[in-house]
Amino acid sequence: EEQNYLNLLKDIISYGEERHDRTGVGTLSLFGKHLQFDISDTFPILTTRKQFFRGIFEELLFYLRGQTNNQILVDKGIHIWTANTTKEFLEKNNLDLEQGDMGPTYGFNFRHFGSEYNNCEYGGIDQLKEVIHLIKHEPHSRRIIISLWDPKNNKKAALPSCLCWYQFYVRKNYLDLLIHIRSSDY
């Protein structure tokens, strides 16, 4: 699995197109590349760059709980969202959010999709609950999908979701997952 990552990294360096981005740093970019992992006997954690394993899982649980208040992560020593939830960042991006509030992004869209984001008062569709129901009761459905891309709310979020589309596929005793990532750092 790691060699697949390293090969993709080499391709980005060798063939990536220079692009300007919102950060002003610039990127080398390739479109439509994919990596595939079989996690039935391994876990695809990189060893060629430092990984904050606890932080990865805390952030995932934070999203799955539908949370958007970065202070919850900060209190656990996780600062992945801190720079994007400062008052300065939010004001610079014309976001009407309190400091530390991520707005309608990952957690909100997992658990409250389609709802108006109003001071963390939620409603909307609980996509995680819907997917679990379909996996259990309609495993052959071709609609076992979570979308975190919400054009109505993206401009109201600190950052729109990078991992923005998940499709599940149940086959025999296996659960396959296809994740579309609109932007990923290497």
Image: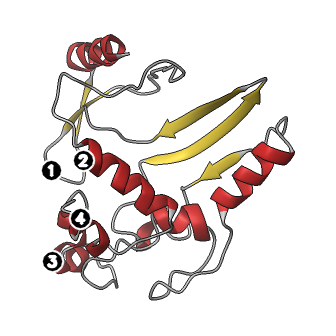
Q: Is residue 186 visible?
A: yes
Identify the residue under disc 1. Answer: 24
* Crowding near the residue tagged with mark 1, few <14, some 14–19, many ≥20 C-alpha atoms within 10 Å: few
- Among numbered discs 2 and 4, the one appearing first in the sequence: 2
Kindly report the distance in space between the C-alpha atoms of the residues bearing marks 2 and 1.
6 Å
Query: Dot 2: what SS?
Result: loop
Query: Dot 3: what SS?
Result: helix
Query: Dot 4: what SS?
Result: loop
* Crowding near the residue tagged with mark 4, few <14, some 14–19, many ≥20 C-alpha atoms within 10 Å: few
Q: Position of residue 118 (x, y in %)?
A: 49, 87
State how the image is colored.
secondary structure
113 vs 91, left or right, is: right
Kindly report the distance in space between the C-alpha atoms of the residues bearing marks 1 and 4.
30 Å
Q: Nearer the viewer, mark 3 or mark 2?
A: 3
> In the rendered structure, which amino acid carries the disc numbered 3?
Glu
87 vs 31, left or right, is: left
Kindly report the distance in space between the C-alpha atoms of the residues bearing marks 3 and 2.
19 Å
Label annotation for residue 46: none
> In the rendered structure, which amino acid carries the disc numbered 2?
Asp
104 vs 147, left or right, is: left
Q: Nearer the viewer, mark 4 or mark 3?
A: 4
In front here: 50 or 164? 50
- Among numbered discs 4 and 3, the one appearing first in the sequence: 4
- Among numbered discs 1 and 4, the one appearing first in the sequence: 1
